[in-house]
Amino acid sequence: MSYNYTLQYRTFDELFADASNDFKKYQLEGIIEPQELIKVAQRVNYDLGLRIYQTKEVMLEVEKHKVRLPNDFYVLNFAFVCNKYEVKTYYPQGTHIEERPIGTVTPEYQQAPPREIDFCTDVIIPQEPTNPCGQCGEPVYNDTCNSCCNNPDSCTLTCKGEVTQIVQVLKSETRYYNQMAPLKITNSKNVDKHCPNLYWDGELRGEIKEGNWLHTNFETGKVYLNYQGMMEDHEGNLLVPNHPKLNEYYEYALKQRILENLVMNDEQVNPSKIQLIETRYRASRNDALSIVNTPNFEEMREVYRMNRKAFYNKYYSMFRSYGGPLDKFTRL
């Protein structure tokens, strides 16, 4: 199966905002709950299939015959065992400079205290210092010490009383893997049926157990994984595709469930609205499935090759034993 590497995504909150915008009356009354609609978006993701999932890759380090898979791992596409690699070191250039805030400095009043005292604010009681810092020897307040104490010259004070430190990040190493070996994977629910690792045969073997561990028959090594990740971002928020034709399917699916919940809560809903949403929902679902399941150029070419091979075996392969010009023609 060929996946889409250019599909854009958006969070469930953005989808819910677009879908609930057409129910402003119920939204202001607080009747619509987004938690009740998350399972609808998950069902639509499952209905559209693996083509909409994010394709990701990672390099894993196997130790003691196993390695933990990424947290967002869903289905394996293919994997290789990387044996040897070359390290190319660069001189420092094209660096990335960051200005990291360290803390703030409390100003000290050198003159007389202010004439007016605000009795509405809480009084700040200075705390007693605890054990001195192990780096600079200065007293430590609130169990924290300034991170610039080991090298005060590396920090600077801004006009706002903020202590900042300049950090320079260097990227000076690149690894080129020049020897890769096939990894035989045992069939499981976390492996795509088109995965070539299911049909490879070799000494290196692996098995995905418990959905998040890769067990191998070799003790240590590096494994490259190409997989379909979960439909969620790095913060764990649910993601949905952001496509003009697919968005309608998601929005009408949410609107259908919103109207269903209103009816179940004995709210007065116009029957024409229910009929309109049902009609638009079926049409948008058919359009979304047709777009997702349409084969791309590579898949159409593979179907053409299989069709041509089938006709060749049916009509021309019987004459191969005779040789001559016909045999040369059938080899094209």
Image (spheres, rainbow, N blue to C red):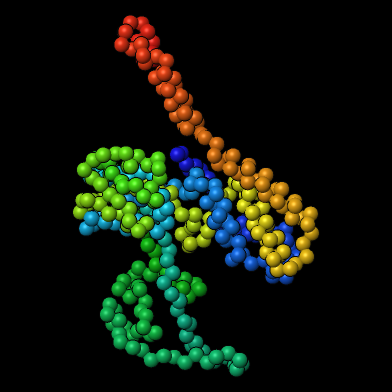
Tag count: 0
User: Residue sitting at 40 percent across and 54 percent down?
Assistant: 73
* Residue closest to the far top: 324
- Quadrant of res 37: bottom right
Q: Is residue 230 visible?
A: yes
User: Residue sitting at 51 percent across and 47 percent down?
Assistant: 49
Give the answer, above or below, for where 194 lies relative to 16.
Answer: above
Image quarter in which the C terminus is found: top left
Q: Is residue 178 visible?
A: no
Q: Front-most of 274 and 91? A: 274
User: Residue sitting at 52 percent across and 51 percent down?
Assistant: 46
Q: Is residue 288 left or right of residue 196?
A: right
Q: Front-most of 318 and 166? A: 318
Residue 246 picture location, percent across and down: 61, 46
Q: Is residue 203 left or right of residue 316?
A: left
Q: Is residue 7 left or right of residue 19?
A: left
Q: Is residue 11 left or right of residue 89?
A: right
Image quarter in which the N terminus is found: top left
Give the answer, above or below, for where 26 lies relative to 14.
Answer: below
Residue 238 picture location, percent across and down: 53, 59
User: Residue sitting at 30 percent across and 51 percent down?
Assistant: 207
Residue 263 picture location, percent across and down: 72, 64
Q: Front-most of 281 and 108? A: 281
Residue 242 picture location, percent across and down: 58, 49
